[in-house]
Image (cartoon, helix red, strand yellow):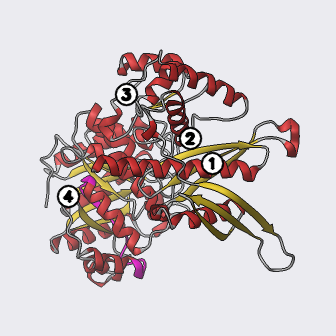
Amino acid sequence: MNSGKKSNSVEILDTTLRDGAQGEGISFSVQDKLAVVRALDELGVAWIEAGNPGSNPKDMEFFRLAGELRLKNSKLCAFGSTRKKDLKPEADPQVKSLLTANTPAVVIFGKSWDLHVREVLRVSPEENIAMIAETAAFLKAWGKTLIYDAEHFFDGWLANPDYALATVKAAIDAGADRIALCDTNGGCFPDTIAEGLRAVLALAAAAGSEALIGIHAHDDSGFANANTAAAVKAGARHIQGTLVGFGERCGNTSLAAVIPSIEIKLGYPCLPAGKLELLCDTTRAVAEIANVSVPDNLPYVGAHAFSHKAGMHADAIIKIRESFEHIDPALVGNDRHFLMSEVGGRSAIAERAKKIDPSITKDHPVTAALANKLKKLEAEGWQFEGADGSFELLVRRELVAQFPERHATLLPEPLFSIEAYRVVSEHPTGETLACSHAWVKVLVDGQHEIAAAEGDGPVNAMDGALRRALTRFYPELEKVRLSDYKVRVIDGIEATAAKVRVLIESTDGVNVWTTVGVSADIIDASRAALVDSIEYKLIGDMEKENNDE
C-alpha cells in the first residue's frame, strides 16, 4: 500500500498507545487500549500505533482482540525494532512477533546516529544499514505497509549527514512506504527540522521513491508542535504524535494542538471531512481513559484556549470575534468562555448569562445585580473564573429572584437539602492507616435518607456519603466522581483561622464542571462546593431530558 500521491493532505499516526504509554504515570489496560482505538477511529486518524507485540503479553492479547474490531477510518500498526545483530529477520523472535500481531501496517525503528551505532548497538556502520534493509525487505515481502522510524535522525544528520542519509536510503530502497524522521531527544529547533527534512525529500526524489516523508517530534525543548508544523511546511505529509501530548520525558507532539493548525491555517486536510469538530471531545475522552487531565492551556482544545477575562477583551470579542480569537472555537468543538471576576465587566457577564436566558444584555438588571454580587463575593474570597458550575447556579438564582414567574423552571424546587452531617478522621498509631468517616442525613421531596461512607480523607468520605444518600433518588449520580480538588488559604494573616477557598472539579465521564466553596472551615467550604456540583449535574440532566422530549 502506498499513498504517496496524496501530497495535498497530511496523514496522522497517533502513538498514544505506544509512545504515550511510556509517559510517567500512564498505564493502559487491554480494555483501555481498545477504547482509545475506538475513539481515534471515530476521529478519523489514518494510523494507530498500538503497541509492541514482542514486549509483553498484554500487547499480544490486545492485538488478538483488536483484530475483531470493525474500524471505519483507522488502520492499526504493530511497533518494533530492526533485527538484532547477527540474526536474520526470519530468525528474530521480535521481528516475527510483528507478523503475529496481524496488523495491516508495521512500524520499525532503526538507528540514524552513528553515535548510537557505535556505543549503543555496538555494531559496524555497515551492519546497522544491513539490519535496516533486511528487516524492511522481510516485512514488505509479507505484504505489510512499512513505516520506518529513523530514530535520532536529526542528531545523526547534524553529526554525520552522509551516514544518517545512508540509513534512510536503506529503508527507502527496501520499499518503505513512509519514512518518519525522529527528533528523539527533542532538542532541535524548527530550522534544523526543515533543513533535514528537505534533505530527505531530495534523497527520496533521486531514488524515485513515492514514500511519504514524515516527522516524529519530542517536546524536550518545548518545540515539538513547532517542529512538526515546520516539517509540514517543508514538505512532510505524515506526522506522528499523541493526541493529548503525553509521552516519554516531556512528551510528544500534541496532535490535538497541531492538527487544527495544519488543517485550518496551512490548508492540508488531516482528518476526514466533518471530523475536526470532534477534536475537543475526543481529546477529553482519551485523557479520561488515560486518567489524566487535558492541560487547560493546550491550544485549541484546552479549557483556557478561548477564555477571556479582561472586560475590554470581552467587549471587543462580542463585537467582532477576530479581535481576540485566532479561529472560531466551534471548528474544533470547543467553546468560548468568559471568566467571571471583578475585572471581567458587564459584557462578559451578559454573554455568559445569555446561555441561560438569551434576552440578557449588558444593561439588563440581572447583569447589574450579578456584577455587584461578584465584586462583593470576590472581596470575601470567592472566585468564579474557574468555577463555571457555581457561576451558572448564581445566574439562575438571580434570575429566579428577580423574575420568579418567568424563570421558575430555571431552578427547580430544592432538589435536596442536607439536614445534618458529621465527619470524623482517625489517625491511629501503629501500622493501621489513617482514614475518615462521614455520616449524612438528606431530605428529598419530603423523604429522609441517611448514609455513611469511609474515605481516604474527610472530603472524600463526605462526597461518598452524600452521593450514596442521594443515589436512591438520583441514580445518575453513580457516574459522577471528583476529578480534582484544590484548596487555597485566602488570608494567611489569620493563620489556622483564615478562610479557605475550595475548588472541586467533577466529571460524569462526558462533561466536566467546577464549583467553589468558601469558609473558615475547610469541611464546610468543601460541602458548599459539593452541593453546587451535584445541583449543577442534576439541573443539567433535567433540562437535557426535557429538551429531548
Does residue 368 sit above or below 421 in this rendering?
above
Magenta residues span: 43-58
Mark 1 → mark 3, Cα distance in angstroms: 27 Å
**Label 1 packing within 10 angstroms: few (<14), some (14-19), many (20+):** many
Residue that badge 3 annotates: 358
Taking the spot 32% from the left edge, 66% from the top edge, the residue there is: 108
Above or below, 26 relative to 139: above
Q: Mark 4 belongs to which amino acid?
A: Asn
Q: CA distance from mark 4 to mark 3?
A: 39 Å
Which of label 4 and label 3 is nearer to you? 3
Q: Can you tell which mark lies on residue 529?
A: 1
Tell me if label 1 and label 2 are in contact, CB under 8 Å.
yes
Lower position in the chain sequence, tag 3 or tag 2: 3
Q: Amino acid at mark 3?
A: Pro
Helix, strand or loop status at disc 3? loop
Q: Residue at x 41, y 37 (%)?
A: 190
Counting residues from the start of the chain, the first of labels 4 and 1 encountered is 4
Residue highlighted by disc 2 = 390
Q: Which mark is residue 73?
A: 4
Question: In which quadrant of the rendered image does the N terminus lie?
Answer: bottom left
Nearer mark to the viewer, of 1 and 3: 3
> Mark 2 vs mark 4: which is more N-terminal?
4
The answer for how far apart the CA atoms under marks 1 and 2 are is 8 Å
Label 4 vs label 1: CA separation?
42 Å
Image x and y of residue 172, in percent: 22, 57
